[in-house]
C-alpha cells in the first residue's frame, strides 16, 4: 500500500506581486506555517533590500511574522537601524516562517542546503500545512520536481543540460543518457524536460542507471501563482523601491560595510544592494541608483514570470478568494 504523501502549498510569483499577504492568510486559515523560497532572505542583517516580512526570532528556530506588523504603521522616511524592522507582534496574528535569517552575509548557501533543510522542516511538522512562499524559481522547481541531493552538486552540469535541450531538443539528451540507462523511458516521464534534465544529471554524475524509486517525490504539491497585469506589477515595484529607500536601504548597506561585508561579497550582488554600493562608491548619483533598482527589479520580475510560465501545473490566481477555493479542493 502506498504511503499517503504530505500535502504542501506553494505561493509563488514575481517580486512585489503580493505573495506574502496571500500566504499569511492561507496559513491562518489552514493551520499552516511559512517557508521562504527566497535566495536572498536567508541572509541575516539584510532586511530592507530583501523585503523580509517583519518579525522576531523565537526559540532560535523560526521567524515569527504577522500581516498586521510592518512599516506602514511606522513613521514614513524614518531611518531604521538594523533589527528595528523585527517588531513586537503581540497585537497581530503570529505565523512561523522558516528559512529566513539563517546565515551571515559572507557565508555560502547552496540549493542543496535549502532543499535538505526545507524537506526536514516539512517532515517535522506532519500535522500542519506547509506553505512555501517566494520567487526563487530554482528553489521551487527543485522541491516540486524532487531534484536529487548529490554530493558535489554541479550547477554547471544542470545549466549545460538545460541549454542542450533548448538547442537540440529532449530526444538528443535522452539518447545520451540511454547509453548508461537503456530503460530510462520506463522510469520517468520523458515528455517532461525538467524531469529528463534531473535524471540526466544523476545518471551522468553517478555513471549508473537511475534507480526505479528515484523521482517519485515525498510530497504532493498545490502551486498557486499570483497573476497581475504588467502595468500594475511594475507600479507596485516602483512603489516598493521608493519605500525601501525611505525605510533606509542606504543606511542598511552602510551598516553592512561597516561590519566588514564589503560590496564584493556575493550577498551584496543582489538588486538594491549592488546599486547602492555603486552610489556609495560615487559611481552613480542617488537618482540614478533608484532608477537602476527599479529597472533591474522589473527585468527580474519578467525573468521570474518566464520561468514560472513553463510549469503548466501552476494555478494562476488573482486574489485570496481564488487561492482559498483551490486550497479547500486540494486538502
Image (tube, rainbow, N blue to C red):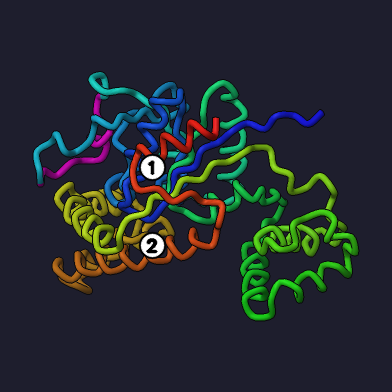
Give the residue drawn at x 74%, y 48%.
215
In-image side of 49 versus 316 (left or right): left
Is the residue 48 above or below the residue 175 in the image? above
As drawn, the label of residue 141 is: none
Q: In this view, does 312 lie above or below 157?
A: above
Q: From the image, which quarter does the N terminus lie in?
A: top right
Whether residue 29 is visible: yes
Q: Residues within 10 Å of mark 1 (few under 14, many from 20)?
A: some
Indicate the secondary structure of the residue bearing disc 1: loop
Q: Position of residue 48 (x, y in %)?
A: 27, 47
Q: Which residue is drawn at 40% across and 25% down?
A: 29
Q: What element carries label 2?
A: helix
Q: Position of residue 49 (x, y in %)?
A: 29, 52
Q: Which residue is drawn at 33% across and 49% down?
A: 50
- Coordinates of residue 18 in the picture (x, y in percent): 32, 46
Give the number of the disc on residue 44.
Answer: 1
x and y percentages locating residue 116 in the rendered image:
62, 41
Verify whether residue 83 appears in magenta. Answer: yes
In reply to whether residue 192 is colored magenta, the answer given is: no
> In this rendering, would 269 be left or right of 183?
left
State if disc 1 and disc 2 touch (CB < 8 Å).
Answer: no
Question: How packed is label 2: few (under 14 Cα within 10 Å), some, or many (20 or more)?
Answer: some
Point out which mark residue 269 bears: 2
Q: Which of marks 2 and 1 is nearer the N terminus?
A: 1
Quadrant housing the C terminus? top right
Task: Give whichever of 34, 154 is nearer the camera.
Answer: 34
Q: Compute the Cα span from label 2 to label 1.
A: 15 Å
Quadrant in which residue 64 is drawn: top left
- Residues shaded magenta: 77-88
Query: Taking 298 as reference, is 55 above or below it?
Result: above
Amino acid at each position: 500500500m502506498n504511503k499517503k504523501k504530505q500535502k504542501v502549498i506553494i505561493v509563488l510569483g514575481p517580486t512585489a506581486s503580493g505573495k506574502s499577504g496571500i500566504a499569511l492568510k492561507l496559513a491562518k486559515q489552514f493551520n499552516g506555517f511559512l517557508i521562504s523560497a527566497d535566495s536572498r532572505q536567508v541572509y541575516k542583517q539584510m532586511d530592507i533590500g530583501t523585503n523580509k516580512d517583519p518579525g522576531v526570532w523565537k526559540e532560535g528556530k523560526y521567524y515569527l511574522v504577522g500581516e498586521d506588523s510592518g512599516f506602514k504603521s511606522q513613521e514614513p522616511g524614518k531611518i531604521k537601524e538594523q533589527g528595528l524592522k523585527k517588531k513586537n507582534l503581540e497585537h497581530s496574528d503570529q505565523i512561523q516562517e522558516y528559512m529566513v535569517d539563517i546565515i551571515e552575509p559572507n557565508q555560502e548557501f547552496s540549493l542543496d542546503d535549502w532543499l535538505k533543510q526545507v524537506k526536514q522542516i516539512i517532515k517535522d511538522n506532519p500535522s500542519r500545512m506547509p506553505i512555501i512562499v517566494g520567487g526563487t524559481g530554482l528553489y521551487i522547481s527543485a522541491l516540486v520536481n524532487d531534484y536529487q541531493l548529490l554530493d558535489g552538486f554541479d550547477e554547471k552540469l544542470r545549466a549545460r543540460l538545460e541549454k542542450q535541450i533548448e538547442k537540440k531538443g529532449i530526444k538528443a539528451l535522452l539518447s545520451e543518457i540511454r547509453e548508461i540507462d537503456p530503460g530510462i523511458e520506463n522510469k520517468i516521464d520523458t515528455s517532461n524536460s525538467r524531469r529528463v534534465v534531473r535524471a540526466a544529471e544523476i545518471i551522468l554524475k553517478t555513471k549508473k542507471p537511475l534507480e526505479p524509486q528515484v523521482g517519485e517525490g515525498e510530497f504532493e504539491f498545490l502551486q498557486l501563482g499570483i497573476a497581475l497585469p504588467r502595468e500594475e506589477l511594475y507600479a507596485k515595484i516602483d512603489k516598493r523601491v521608493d519605500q525601501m529607500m525611505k525605510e533606509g536601504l542606504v543606511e542598511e548597506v552602510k551598516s553592512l560595510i561597516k561590519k566588514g561585508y564589503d560590496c564584493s561579497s556575493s550577498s551584496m550582488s543582489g538588486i538594491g544592494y549592488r546599486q547602492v554600493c555603486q552610489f556609495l562608491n560615487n559611481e552613480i548619483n542617488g537618482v540614478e541608483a533608484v532608477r537602476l533598482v527599479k529597472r533591474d527589479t522589473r527585468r527580474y520580475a519578467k525573468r521570474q514570470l518566464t520561468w514560472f510560465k513553463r510549469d503548466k501545473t501552476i494555478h494562476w490566481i488573482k486574489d485570496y478568494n481564488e487561492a482559498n477555493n483551490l486550497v479547500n479542493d486540494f486538502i
